[in-house]
Image (cartoon, helix red, strand yellow):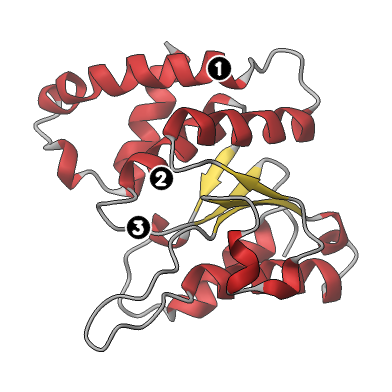
Amino acid sequence: MPLEPRDVFINCPFDAAYRPFFHAIVFTVTRSGFRARCALETDNAADNRLAKICQIIKQCPYGIHDISCTEAGGDPPLPRFNMPLELGLFLGAQRFGGRHDKRKCCIVLDREPYRFQRFISDIAGQDIHSHAGDVPTLILKVATWLRTQSDDPRVPGGRAIAAEYAAFEARLPVICAARRLDPDELTFGDFARIAAEAIAT
C-alpha cells in the first residue's frame, strides 16, 4: 500500500472538549496544502477500529499527535491511552516498516513542556511541542511544522492561518445554517469539506 504524499494522520481526542483544537488542526492541515486523515473518516460497524487506524497510518507519511489529554477520568478513574498507543503505532511503522515507511515524520504536541515525561518517558528523545491549551498557539506549531514539510513558499505562516481560522470559525454557523446543519452535529467529513471549500474561495 503506497504512501499518499499529502496525507496527514491526526491522532487526538474526538470529544466535545477537544473539538475546537481538532477543528483547528483539520483547518490548518487543509490550508497548508495537505489532506487530513483520522479514524473518524469512515463509520462502518463492520470495520475493526485498530485495523482501520493501522491502514490510515500505513498510507500517511505525516502524523500529528496530541498527547495532552491523558488524565484519568470515569469511575474508577483511568487514564486515556489511545493517543500514546497510536503514536507508538506510527513510530513503530516508521522504524520497522518498509522502505516507504522510513520517510514518515511527525509532530508530537502536549499542553506543557516536559509534562509527557510523567506518563510516557520513553519518548524523551523526541522534540515535543507545547501548545499551552491555546488554539492559536496550536495552529502556529502545526502550521510551522507543515510548512517545513511542504517546502512550499505559497503556504502562509501560522499567525496568518490562525487569523484565517478565526474568521472561518465566525462564519461557520452561517455556513452550517445554509446547509441545514447544526455546528455541533458536523461529522469529520462535513467539517473537512466545509473547510476545504472555504479555503478554496
For residue 159, the mark is 1
Q: Position of residue 62 (x, y in %)?
A: 69, 50
Q: Secondary structure at mark 3?
A: loop
Q: CA distance from mark 2 to mark 1?
A: 17 Å
122, above or below 133, in the image: below
Q: Which mark is residue 22?
A: 2
Question: Which kind of residue does numbered mark 1 sit on?
Answer: Arg
Residue 22 percent across, percent down from the top left: 41, 45
Q: Residues within 10 Å of mark 1 (few under 14, many from 20)?
A: some
- In primary-sequence order, the first of circles 3 and 2 is 3
Residue 103's place in the image compared with 21, above or below, is below
Q: Residue at x 48, y 76 (%)?
A: 81
The correct choice, above or below, for 201 with respect to 30 in the image is above
Residue 21 in the image: state x and y as whole percent: 40, 42
The amino acid type of the residue labelled 3 equals Phe
Q: Are marks 3 and 2 in contact (CB under 8 Å)?
A: yes
Of helix, strand and loop, which one carries label 1?
A: helix
Query: The residue tagged with tag 2: helix, strand or loop?
Result: helix
What residue is at 51 percent from the left and 67 percent from the top? 83
Q: Which residue is mark 3?
A: 14
Label 2 crowding class (10 Å Cα cut-off): few <14, some 14-19, many 20+?
A: many
Dot 3 crowding, Cα within 10 Å, few <14, some 14–19, many 20+: some
Q: Nearer the viewer, mark 2 or mark 1?
A: 1
